[in-house]
Image (cartoon, grey):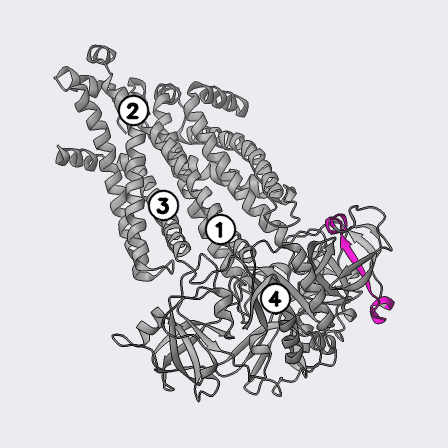
Amino acid sequence: MIRHLFTLIWNRRRANFLLIAEIFLAFVVLFVVGSLLVYNQQNYRTPPGFAYEQVWCISLDPGALPRAGQLATVRQVMSRLRALPEVVAVGRTSSNTPFSGSTNGSTVGIGMERKNSIESVSGHLVEDDLREVLQLPVVAGRWFDKRDDGATLRPAVISRDLGERLFPRQSALGQTIGRNGEELRVVGLIEQFRADDPLSESRPAILLRVSPQDTAWDEASAMLLRVRPGAGAALERRMTTEIMAIAKGWNVGITALPEQRAAQLKRALTPLVALGLVCVFLIVNVAMGLFGVLWQTINQRRAEIGLRRAMGASAGAISGQVVGEILVVTTFGLALGLLVAAQFPLLGVLNVRPAVYTQAMLLATGLVYVLTTLCALYPSRLAAAIHPAVALREE
Amino acid sequence: MLLSYLKIAWKVLQRRKFFTFISLFGISFTLMILLVVYAMVDYTVGPQMPEKRLDRLLFTSEMVIQGHDTENMSSPSYSFLEHYIRPMRTPEKISISTGQGSTVAYVGNQKLKLDQKYTDAEFWQVLDFDFVEGRPYNGAEVRAAAHVAVLNESSARNYFGTARGIIGRTIVTDEIRYRVVGMVRDVPATRRFTYAEVWMPITTSTVNIHDPEYMGWCQAILLARTAAEVPAMQREFAQAVARAPLPTATYKWCQEMRLYAGSLLATTVRHERREDGPSDGVARLGGLLAGLTLLFLLLPALNLVNINVSRIFDRSSEIGVRKAFGATSGTLIGQFLVENIFLTLLGGALGLGLAAGALHLLNGSGLIAYTQFGLNGRVFGVGLAGVFGFGLLSGVYPAYKMSKLSAVQALKGATNK
């Protein structure tokens, strides 16, 4: 039966060429859009690795004011902020704070010769207090503390995946790694630290300690602070006034991390939503077209169907044939489409993980089959309802 | 002749309403998407307020300082533009302003974050802002570093509670008092070089004119006397950049310094695509976009072709009669193309309405601040071209198939394709 259907379609391949081309294109569109959606959805579901709900970010910019005394001003500001009853903890960090849009990528390897090097590692400079601010869970080793003050090598806490990729099958704790020509000692591991926007791929991260002895201010120019639940605009205004009183002439920006995250999410989602809408339109268009063509075909093949019915084919067999035929046409279109889709992971067109392509292929294949079946259902029932006597008399 | 074709087309459309609906749906939505995308592009890089004299304007790109294996990319500094670009002779006027920053004002306890830009006095002469009230600040005020500001309408309403009679009142941003001298109509946030909510004299900012650093956060806008002088201005700009000594004091590894002036389109594309070489990437992006558009059009066009092909055979007896009475294939193809273009025009008119609705929704959603996307003459022209292209694309193949029907078979009502 199925072989017979394939032969039927193959014999009429010229006539079915346009349908096959349409299904092929619809599959490619679904596959590309599906890949992007699956990729972004998987990234979105990866947890950030820290708590950001009650965290605010303060950026301080001295503009062209003299450099001397800048750090002293910042320390004064921080102790003033700590004294506020609504503030739980304050810590300085580098300007690539979570969800700020500013990112860092550097190469990290083993030792100074940077063996086994891993690119695009997100690097952050943090003060000891930042663990309390972001409630970072340390999964192995320890967080920075006073013991690190006299350390010969700068201590670093790295994400678990970075540790596993640098030192497969052994512990990363206590090892020496190199980044930007500086040797570092790994003292602890965290699960992960995703400071990029919520839809981008998770990257390995490395946190470096800013010790109280460091005198340079600009390498950790931002401040993160944890506030008590319920703190709002009134606290923000008070902070601005108090900071301005200490840091005269500085530019102060206070933003809540959840707000920044929501803004980033909106910016990342907008093109995806637009793409999704265009895709839905194209698919609805294809579905209606397919439906129309099938309906028309049934009308043209009344004689043939009437003859089959007269020869004893059941109504079920007729509708089965109609649906079967369109499924065979779909299979031809899909075979072409899968050939094209298979090139995507090989050429790395969309820059997503290869596993995503497989999922998107399955998704698109399933959707196209469902779509064509749905479009064929009504015409197939129409065909099954053809009365042989009427159809044959028309001829 | 044409009239009777149109009459036939109208009758055919009414014959099978469902098919007509599918065709019109496909055409109108395709056109709507094309129009919305084009309107967004036009409102980003087309001649709109405040860059109305776009054919005479040039904008500076990001500066690239290139070493053997290091490359820094950033906007140029105020001092660089002031020392090397300001003295140029070809431009009628040159304006230097900062990139977009932000400042905070408070209304009671409510924080009001304002996008801010520091500019010189020429900024207001090079560009054409719509002043609702007051005036721009002038050269004397900029030289004296007067604390004066120009606000946009929405921010004035948010800060003062009213958008009338605010001239001379005081706005406190970042704890500094500014006197409002002018209020302009809102500038869409898509205008990267000119958009802000509050504009202030560049001398009140922290940029330092004596700073030897080449990289900073400023931009220049150059106005030529006539559109014909723009290429000459571009050449002089290149010479001016070449004359500046390499900043080897700050960047010891520096071997080359690049900065370009280009049209709004070229500079925007250069920025978005992070092009850092002499080519601005417009041609490449244009090619890519044309390819994508064609791909996007292909699916609805194929769909329409499919529908048209199956509709033709409804009319095989009509075609048979016409052929029997001596109509040539050419005439029939012509008739069918006219019918199809008539159909696409109808869909186009619908699409235009849909696009207007979609843009209205987009404006209301506040997705991009202060945008008032709309349909103007250019957008309409693109739409019309799109409709004709689409009509031809989807009409040629079915018309060809129709003309191939042999008269005898058609009269018999044969349906073998």
Classed neighbour count for the residue bearing mark 4: other residues with Cα under 10 Å, few (<14), some (14–19), many (≥20): many
Alpha carbon separation for disc pair 1 and 3: 18 Å
Residue, x 32% and y 55% (percent of image)? A356
Q: Which residue is mark 4?
A: A58
Q: Nearer the viewer, residue A270 or B301?
A: A270
Residue, x 49% and y 83% (percent of image)? B68
Q: Would you say residue B102 is visible in this rendering?
A: no
**Badge 1: chain ID:** A
Q: Is residue B354 above or below residue B126?
A: above
Q: Are marks 4 and 2 on the same chain?
A: yes
Quadrant of the image containing the C terminus of chain A: top left
Classed neighbour count for the residue bearing mark 2: other residues with Cα under 10 Å, few (<14), some (14–19), many (≥20): many
Alpha carbon separation for disc pair 2 and 1: 39 Å
Question: Would you say the residues marked 2 and 1 are in contact, meaning their CB atoms lie under 8 Å apart?
Answer: no
Q: Residue A30 — which label?
A: 3
Identify the mark nearer the N-term, 4 or 2: 4
Q: Position of residue A377 (x, y in %)?
A: 28, 27
Q: Position of residue B52 (x, y in %)?
A: 72, 53
Q: Residue A269 — which label?
A: 1
Residue type at mark 4?
Answer: Ile
Is B155 a magenta residue?
A: yes
Q: Are marks 1 and 3 on the same chain?
A: yes
**Badge 2: chain ID:** A
Q: Which residue is mark 2?
A: A379
Residue type at mark 3?
Answer: Leu
Q: Write down the region rendered in magenta.
A: B140-158
Which of label 2 and label 1 is nearer to you?
A: 1
Mark 4 falls on what kind of element?
A: strand
Alpha carbon separation for disc pair 2 and 3: 25 Å
